Image: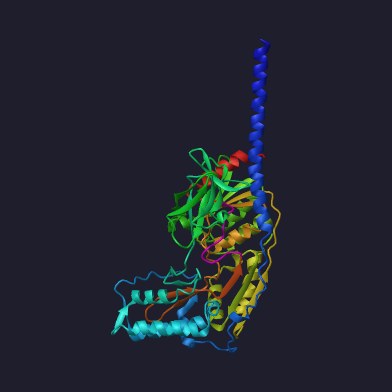
């Protein structure tokens, strides 16, 4: 009898020990993750104090650059882009050349990134090359062909907000990954198991810097792990790993998948916001910042979120929209306006001031928050000036305290103001970014649209450029890399395991 009791109590003690050990393991997962994320956040470098005068064109104070009657072809990019089919449309050769000359004059006096992407000689050579290509046609050419001429020749403008008839010419980095092998690390390096045998990774694609190919992730059960992954502008279907077991060497081919990312229909994007609970975990889905109809809802959601222990902000597929939405959310969550590392160069030329005034007429001033009312007033004052002027402003990152543990889900389709929101959230402690790199569309503002008079092709660009923490075309990189679309499920599992710890 005593033996049975002894065995019973022994089993209980062992069970308690195992549960305690299990919880400590999970606690260390969460704490390790938060510590690493916060350390990275605090180590973000201040934007270098470079000499930016090389990008500033010295205009005459009242130089418009185009004929005053041509201002009608310029409007705010906020205005809806009219549906325009290129099918079957042609343009006379001399009119196409006129469009090209007009566009280059507009960009020279309006696009803030003009000298960043090339000197005057480069722009002139590109323009002349385009004119020569148009002259190769007898009398007229398809408008679609003119669009292709524009896109191929302006490829050097690696600016995600520079659009030709709604199409981007930016080259982007995509995340490629493999989850067949869990990668581990000890004092000797990174290793994996093949048929229960331990193999150290000597190189990936003949590159001995193995660390850059090993990405922190969550497995399908929500446990922390590491997988092989690569962020590249060149497509990858597989990589070659050279392995060393200590007694022999071998090479294996590891197949890679390309991350997909979420895409929302226009109808679903118009809703923008959704709130739900999954296993009692608040999930705030923000798939679009296009409309401001849900602004009050965002305010309430932010106030609610800051009282939670854990929340998930799902930004996947959010291609941006109006900055007032994420900025309002952040202000209501923290009580402050975010400060990120950035240098912004703004061109307040006469052309741009004309467009800014038009944009301000579209704004409902009374619906704005105090912060945006102040911004409206400063924009109105700036656009009322009758001379060309450059403005260079610098902002340094301020990391704010935050007790709510926030998991932000991102993917390659997060862009523009949604990426600006990511940068704002990165100023808060206890925030973890999960998914893949974002789109990398932050270099300029999408503020101006020029419609070419004859072809009716629309070219969209910005009156300001910024240098900050996100590389154009590469985007913001997450703390935890997950290439598939089951990111939410894995994060929920991870949080459930760590709640209350």
Is residue 157 toward the left or the right of residue 25 in the image?
A: left
**x and y percentages locating residue 70 in the rendered image:** 46, 85
- Give the residue at the far top of this rendering: 1
Q: Is residue 380 above or below residue 481?
A: below
Q: Position of residue 490 (x, y in %)?
A: 53, 44
- In the rendered view, tell whether residue 493 sits above or below residue 241: above
Quarter of the image that includes the C terminus: top right
Q: Magenta segment, principal secondary structure? A: loop
Q: What residue is at 45 percent from the left and 52 percent from the top?
A: 256
| Screen quadrant of the N terminus | top right
| Nearest to the observer: residue 293 or residue 395 | 395
Q: Quadrant of residue 260?
A: bottom left
Q: Quadrant of residue 147?
A: bottom left
Question: Is 390 included in the stretch rendered in magenta?
Answer: no
81 or 227: nearer the viewer: 227
Residue toward you, 327 or 107: 107
Is residue 243 visible in this depiction of the protein? Answer: yes
The residue sitting at the front extreme is 247
- Horizontal side of residue 41 vs 291, given as left or right: right
Q: Which residues are magenta?
A: 469-480
Residue in front for this viewpoint, 358 or 323: 323
Q: Is residue 428 visible?
A: no
- The picture places residue 327, in percent across and down from the top left corner, at 61, 61
Residue at (52% x, 72% y) in the render: 447
Q: Residue at x 34, y 74 (%)?
A: 144
Residue 470 located within the stretch drawn in magenta: yes
């Amino acid at each position: 009898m005593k033996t049975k009791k002894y065995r019973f109590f022994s089993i209980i003690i062992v069970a308690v020990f195992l549960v305690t050990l299990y919880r400590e393991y999970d606690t260390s997962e969460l704490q390790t993750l938060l510590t690493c994320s916060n350390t990275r956040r605090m180590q973000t470098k201040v934007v270098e104090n470079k000499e930016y005068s090389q990008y500033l064109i010295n205009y005459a104070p009242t130089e418009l650059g185009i004929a005053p009657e041509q201002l009608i072809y310029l409007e705010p990019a906020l205005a809806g882009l009219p549906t325009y089919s290129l099918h079957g449309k042609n343009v006379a050769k001399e009119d196409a050349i006129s469009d090209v000359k007009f566009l280059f004059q507009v960009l020279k006096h309006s696009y803030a990134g003009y000298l960043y992407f090339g000197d005057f000689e480069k722009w002139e050579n590109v323009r002349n090359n385009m004119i020569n290509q148009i002259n190769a046609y007898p009398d007229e050419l398809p408008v679609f062909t003119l669009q292709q001429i524009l896109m191929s020749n302006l490829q050097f403008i690696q600016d995600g907000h520079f659009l030709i008839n709604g199409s981007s010419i930016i080259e982007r980095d995509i995340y490629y990954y493999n989850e067949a092998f869990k990668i581990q690390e000890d004092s000797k390096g990174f290793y994996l198991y093949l048929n229960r045998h331990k193999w150290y990774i000597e190189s990936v694609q003949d590159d001995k810097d193995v660390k850059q190919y090993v990405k922190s992730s969550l497995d399908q059960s929500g446990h922390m792990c590491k997988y092989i992954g690569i962020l590249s502008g060149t497509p990858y279907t597989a990589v070659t790993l050279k392995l060393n077991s200590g007694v022999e060497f071998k090479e294996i081919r590891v197949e890679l998948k390309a991350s997909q990312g979420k895409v929302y229909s226009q109808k679903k994007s118009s809703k923008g916001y959704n709130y739900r609970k999954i296993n009692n975990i608040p999930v705030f889905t923000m798939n679009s910042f296009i409309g401001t109809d849900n602004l009050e809802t965002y305010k309430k959601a932010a106030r609610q979120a800051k009282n939670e222990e854990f929340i998930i902000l799902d930004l996947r597929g959010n291609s941006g929209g109006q900055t007032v939405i994420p900025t309002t959310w952040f202000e209501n969550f923290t009580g402050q306006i975010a400060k990120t590392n950035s240098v912004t160069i703004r061109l307040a030329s006469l052309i741009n001031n004309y467009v800014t005034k038009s944009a301000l007429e579209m704004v409902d001033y009374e619906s704005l928050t105090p912060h945006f009312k102040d911004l409206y007033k400063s924009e109105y004052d700036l656009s009322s000036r009758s001379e060309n002027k450059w403005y260079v402003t610098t902002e340094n990152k301020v990391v704010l305290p935050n007790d709510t543990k926030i998991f932000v889900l991102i993917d390659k389709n997060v862009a523009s103001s949604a990426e600006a929101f990511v940068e704002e959230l990165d100023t808060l402690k206890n925030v973890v970014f999960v998914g893949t790199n974002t789109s990398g569309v932050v270099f300029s503002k999408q503020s101006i649209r020029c419609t070419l008079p004859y072809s009716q092709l629309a070219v969209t660009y910005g009156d300001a450029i910024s240098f900050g923490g996100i590389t154009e075309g590469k985007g913001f990189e997450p703390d935890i890399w997950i290439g598939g679309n089951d990111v939410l499920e894995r994060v929920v599992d991870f949080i459930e395991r760590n709640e209350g710890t």
